[in-house]
């Protein structure tokens, strides 16, 4: 991981070749995180982990001044990029042109309806509200939910103790649960 930190430093200093060196160093980790995150999506997700990693990487490296402050900050930015891609994808699928005005019916015995797009959009809206009130807790949720990091990994990325991360996680989950359980009600 020292190579990642050095490469991120070179990118920040304007080295034009450093971005090319970064992808091989972080690709496996980003792919693992993306696969874990997409594994929690409901069936019918058409976005693949490889495509998610490539799109997130292009968004991360394509900026003029990424301003990363180390490995943790880079992975936090990657989690945010993946979240935005998943939200954009859910919104795109929600448009009538892409069948968003139609409801999926699972061909099971109970014929239950699945609504993964609405769930993800509702989570994004609630997470945006949480970020306005409690930015550090929202960042923890992004790292855990969208990047698939463990509590300890997310704590290290945020520069907080595991105990603080655990407290933040409990509060954030309760806040989001309240925001998502009753439509129109803010916690």
Image (spheres, rainbow, N blue to C red):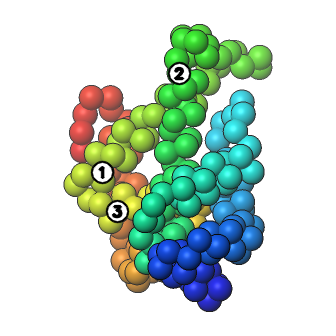
Q: Residue furthest bottom?
A: 2
Front tag of 3 and 2: 2
58 up-or-down from 163: above or below:
above
Q: How far is disc 3 from disc 1 in space, using C-alphas?
A: 8 Å
Q: Alpha-carbon distance for marks 3 and 2?
A: 28 Å
Q: Secondary structure at mark 1?
A: helix
- Residue bearing mark 2: 94
Residue at image x 53%, y 21%? Answer: 94
In the displayed structure, does residue 182 sit left or right of residue 19? left
Is the residue marked by circle 3 packed among few (<14), some (14-19), or many (20+) residues within 10 Å? many
Looking at the image, residue 165 sits to the left or right of residue 117; the answer is left
Mark 2 to mark 1: distance in Å? 24 Å
Please provide percent x and percent y for residue 138: 36, 58
Which badge, 3 or 2, is on the more N-terminal residue? Answer: 2
Residue depicted at x 30% and y 53%: 131
User: Disc count in the image?
Assistant: 3
Which secondary structure, mark 3? helix
Considering depth in this image, is 14 or 124 the residue closer to the camera?
A: 14
Residue position marked by numbered label 1 in the rendering: 130
Image quadrant in which the N terminus is located: bottom right
Q: Nearer the viewer, residue 39 or 178?
A: 39
Instruction: State which tag comes first along the sequence, 3 or 1.
Output: 1
Q: Which label was assigned to residue 137?
A: 3
Mark 2 residue element: helix
Residue 22 shows up from this direction: no
Assign the C terminus to one quadrant of the image.
top left
> Tags 3 and 1 in contact by the CB under 8 Å rule?
yes
Q: Which image quarter: residue 48? A: top right
**Snapshot quadrant of residue 121:** top left
Q: Is residue 67 left or right of residue 94?
A: left
Residue 13 % position (x, y): 47, 79
């Amino acid at each position: 991981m020292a190579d990642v930190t050095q490469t991120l430093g070179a990118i920040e200093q304007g080295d034009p070749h450093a971005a090319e060196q970064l992808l091989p160093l972080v690709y496996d980790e980003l792919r693992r995180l993306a696969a874990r995150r997409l594994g929690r999506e409901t069936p019918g997700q058409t976005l693949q982990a490889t495509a998610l990693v490539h799109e997130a990487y292009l968004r991360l490296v394509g900026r003029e001044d990424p301003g990363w402050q180390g490995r943790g900050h880079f992975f936090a930015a990657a989690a945010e990029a993946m979240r935005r891609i998943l939200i954009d994808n859910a919104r795109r699928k929600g448009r009538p042109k892409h069948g968003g005005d139609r409801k999926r019916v699972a061909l099971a015995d109970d014929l239950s309806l699945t609504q993964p797009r609405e769930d993800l959009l509702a989570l994004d809206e609630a997470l945006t509200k949480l970020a306005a009130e409690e930015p550090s807790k929202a960042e923890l949720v992004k790292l855990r939910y969208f990047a698939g990091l463990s509590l300890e990994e997310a704590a290290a990325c945020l520069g907080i103790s595991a105990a603080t991360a655990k407290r933040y996680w409990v509060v954030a989950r309760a806040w989001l649960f309240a925001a998502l359980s009753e439509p129109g009600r803010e916690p």
